[in-house]
């Protein structure tokens, strides 16, 4: 999916597969539960302002909108670096006037510091090298005054085998077949996510998981990166140390 030039129908089908995965295999829940917990103590009078980064097909901000409609007004901004993804997400969100879609690079967001109560992202982290992930997490923390929620798959053989079987049984889309298992191989472990968050100046304060293959963390921004956080290699495309992940250039 990272490579441009795929036919629209192929991309649309792939985003539909991701939407079903989020709905049936814990993705929506892994965003909504920590988000609700994170925002529970905020002032209920003003409308919530939530930013979703690397939104893809926009199913996560639509889920947040449905959740908020039963509780309090919400204003959502869904951003993605892909104009094609933003156009598709906007087309599928006609019933959600509370969502605005914008084209923006997650590593350099065009929003003021503290412009949102919270920022979320789902299934984006594993697409990024360490420097890219750090930049995205840092920007999310800068834009969100309360905290951030990040959910993603976890690298491991169980998840890889599950992704291989699930994509073959649940889809006929070539992108889904290719990206599902590869995404698990490119994903981070929970410990690596914690290190990336700390290096980006975020402190995870809650973790949620689903079936061992996917986790989410809620985090608050700190004044500076945690002193014990692991830093990435000087060359982000260089191989990681023995026994660690191998970084695949995008």
Image (cartoon, helix red, strand yellow):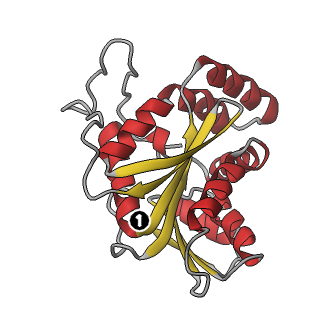
Considering only vertical position in the picture, is 238 above or below 250? above
- Name the outermost residue toward the left: 234
- Find residue 31 and report its horizontal and vertical position in percent: 63, 54
Which residue occupies 56% across, 29% down? 184
- Find residue 17 and report its horizontal and vertical position in percent: 72, 45
- Find residue 83 and report its horizontal and vertical position in percent: 49, 63
Secondary structure beneath label 1: loop
- Name the outermost residue toward the front: 41
Q: Quadrant of the N terminus?
A: top right
Residue 243 is left or right of residue 39, and the answer is left
Total number of numbered discs in the rendering = 1
The residue under label 1 is: 104
Residue 116 is left or right of residue 45, and the answer is left
Which residue occupies 71% across, 24% down? 162
Residue 238 is left or right of residue 150, and the answer is left
Which residue occupies 62% across, 60% down? 37
Considering only vertical position in the picture, is 93 above or below 161? below
Which residue occupies 55% across, 74% down? 42
Q: Quadrant of residue 208?
A: top right
């Amino acid at each position: 999916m990272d490579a441009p030039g795929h036919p629209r129908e192929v991309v649309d089908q792939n985003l539909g597969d991701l939407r079903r995965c989020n709905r049936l295999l814990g993705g929506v829940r892994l965003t909504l539960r920590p988000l609700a917990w994170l925002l529970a103590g905020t002032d209920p009078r003003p409308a919530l302002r939530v930013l979703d980064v690397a939104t893809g097909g926009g199913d996560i901000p639509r889920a947040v909108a449905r959740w908020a409609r039963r509780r309090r007004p919400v204003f959502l901004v869904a951003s993605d670096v892909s104009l094609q993804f933003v156009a598709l997400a906007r087309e599928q969100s006609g019933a959600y006037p509370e969502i605005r879609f914008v084209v923006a690079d997650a590593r350099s967001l065009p929003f003021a510091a503290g412009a949102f109560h919270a920022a979320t992202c789902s299934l984006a982290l594993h697409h990024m090298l360490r420097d890219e992930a750090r930049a995205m997490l840092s920007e999310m923390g800068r834009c969100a005054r309360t905290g951030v929620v990040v959910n993603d798959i976890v690298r491991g053989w169980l998840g890889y085998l599950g992704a291989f079987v699930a994509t073959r049984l649940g889809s006929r889309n070539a992108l889904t077949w290719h990206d599902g298992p590869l995404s698990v191989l490119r994903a981070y472990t929970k410990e690596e996510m914690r290190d990336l968050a700390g290096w980006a100046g975020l402190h995870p304060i809650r973790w949620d998981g689903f079936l061992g293959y996917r986790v989410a963390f809620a985090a608050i921004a700190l004044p500076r990166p945690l002193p014990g956080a692991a830093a990435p290699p000087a060359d982000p495309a260089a191989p990681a140390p023995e026994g660690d992940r191998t970084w695949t250039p995008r």
